[in-house]
Image (cartoon, helix red, strand yellow):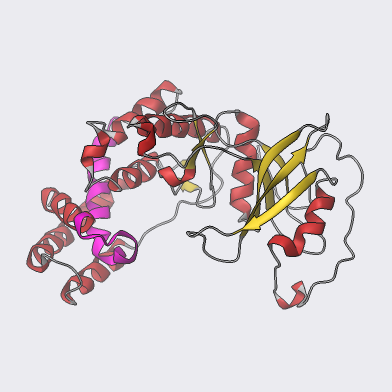
Amino acid sequence: MTEHLSGPARTLLPSDTGPKPTSSASHSPSDEQGYIPHGRELEDELLQACNQRLIDVHWFRTDWQRGGASTGKGLILDEQLKPHNVVIKLPIPESERLWHTRLSKADNDIVPHVYAHGDQLGQYNVNWIVMEYMPFGPLSSKWDGKEFDLLVGAYGRMAKAMDTYPVTEEPPVKDWQAIWQKSREMVHSHAIANEQRWNKALKLAHRKLKQWTTKLQDQPMDHWVHGDLHFGNALSRVAPPDGPALLIDFACVHAGHWLTDAIYLEHLYWARRDMLKGRKLCSMIAKQRRKNGLRVCAQWPQWAQIHRALLAMSTPAMLEHDGSPMHVEAALNILEASV
């Protein structure tokens, strides 16, 4: 089953049966110069694409937002003219729209409902989406620890739905030798504490690097992974501490192995294990996969150890993202235990 995102703009509104309207609005500079407008610059085209059922639109940017994408809030009217609170995102990566719409069709409790979406607005090739507004979240300690259970449950539902789509691309391949080299250079430049310990741990890790990567070649890299699994991408329709949680932001979806997501989520709490209250995230995700009828290889605990070692080894190379002293020391402890 293959789903393509080429072609005219489209929405999920039942009354959308006629030809797409075109906009006479002018933009400068033109898209021929590589300029892609966003937000209110494309609001007229967006309203037309939604059959004028999108109203009271307000655009904003979040503190953590990067790039030129815009986010809006508004109301959309259904066939009975009942208003629904929505969030508008444009432009978004093609993969984000693809997976959000696929998962919206699969289950009501995986992602926020999609009211409208498309890949064109006026003369511009722009991926956009109008989705259900989530009043609660992102998930946090307000859920009193239950946030971990809700996130793992949402991930299990997502994985089950994604499994119905065959993998049609090669998984990304990391150059671990180059990553090791960058980590070594960062340590040698006195960028982090415990320089001697890091030097020794990296030296020992280099001796095992080929062995680790060879063992990971046995992993079946034949399913889809989220690529950015954390609480910032988990919201809820209901107030804490209840759920379910719903996932957002599918721009990083790629072919791979579920341990990529599991270890990434786990590593965020290497320095804050007390927050887990004894939970073992990888084991929880493995259990969810089995519950949903998905494959879980017997070797996964050994593969998980290698993933941890490689991610810990990478920490000095990623100080821009994972540079807090507590996290760096926790990563060092994990690497030392692995070599």
In this picture, residue 245 sits left or right of residue 302 = right
Image x and y of residue 280, in percent: 26, 33
Image x and y of residue 335, in percent: 16, 53
Instruction: Give the image quarter of residue 286.
Output: top left
Residue closer to the observer: 308 or 44: 44
User: Vertical placement of 275 versus 45: above or below?
Assistant: above
In this picture, residue 68 sits left or right of residue 336 = right
Numbered range of the magenta stretch = 298-326
Residue closer to the observer: 224 or 269: 269
Q: Which quarter of the figure is the N terminus placed in?
A: top right
In this picture, residue 184 sits left or right of residue 225 = left
User: Vertical placement of 51 versus 314: above or below?
Assistant: above
Picture residue at 16% right of the left edge, 49% below the top: 334
Total marks placed: 0
User: Vertical placement of 216 versus 182: above or below?
Assistant: above
Q: Is residue 305 magenta?
A: yes
Q: Is residue 84 magenta?
A: no
Instruction: Give the image quarter of residue 242.
Output: top left
Image x and y of residue 170, in percent: 49, 52
Residue closer to the observer: 13 or 139: 139
Image x and y of residue 137, in percent: 48, 40
The answer to whether residue 229 is visible is: no
Q: Would you say the magenta stretch is mainly helix, strand or loop?
A: helix
Picture residue at 44% right of the left edge, 55% below the top: 172
Picture residue at 64% right of the left edge, 48% below the top: 97
In this picture, residue 162 sits left or right of residue 200 = right
